[in-house]
Amino acid sequence: MRIKKPLFVRKDAKKKIRFGIKRKIKWRRQKGRDSKIRQKMKGYPKMPNIGYGTQKSIRGLIENKKPILIYNLEDLKKTSSKDYILVAHISMKNKIEIAKFAKEKGIKINNLNLKKTLRKEKIKQKIETKKENK
């Protein structure tokens, strides 16, 4: 079970827009002589420490499953439908092949929308047929 850790916010992030939105704020260690965060005073934002890390047994897991990266159709055939499957950064041609196979076998791919991917294939086919007719 993961323990909720504090949001590590850069000093004066709320005051200055250039430090970014909450989700995109990048942590910078406090180095100032009188910095209350560096001195770890009560009531100030927390600093990242070793103790905030996740347990080794659950580190890197998504939905309590180890994610499996798929690069091609052969990798997908080796997996089961119970695995947490992610498609790597690959070409649209390979994504379409993977989407077809996944739809046939009823495999859920977590970072690929099967309907949209297969719709793109149909659009490409229509464009090709129009080019051939000209």
Image: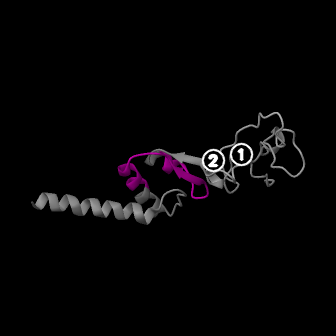
State the extent of the magenta-drawn residues as a range.
75-98
What amino acid is found at the position of numbered circle 2 in the picture? Phe
Q: Quadrant of the C terminus?
A: bottom left
Residue of label 2: 19
Any mark on residue 123, and which? none
Drawn side of residue 14 relative to residue 35, left or right: left
Q: Look at the numbered disc 2 and give the secondary structure of its residue.
A: helix
Give me the C-alpha separation between circle 1 and circle 2: 8 Å
Residue 130 placed where, x, y %? 16, 62
Residue 94 placed where, x, y %? 39, 49
Drawn side of residue 108 relative to residue 2, left or right: left
Residue at the far left: name it. Answer: 134
How dense is the environment of label 1, judged by Cα within 10 Å: few (below 14), some, or many (20 and up)?
Answer: many
- Residue at the (52%, 58%) spot, across then down: 109
What amino acid is found at the position of numbered circle 1 in the picture? Arg
- Choose top left, top right, bottom left or bottom right for residue 132: bottom left
Q: Are marks 1 and 2 in contact (CB under 8 Å)?
A: yes
Instruction: Please say which color scheme the image uses.
Output: one colour
How dense is the environment of label 2, judged by Cα within 10 Å: few (below 14), some, or many (20 and up)?
Answer: some
Drawn side of residue 133 relative to residue 84, left or right: left
Residue of label 1: 10
Drawn side of residue 69 relative to residue 29, left or right: left
Q: Which badge, 1 or 2, is on the more N-terminal residue? A: 1
Q: Nearer the viewer, residue 10 or 109?
A: 10
Q: Is residue 82 magenta?
A: yes
- Residue at the (20%, 58%) spot, across then down: 128
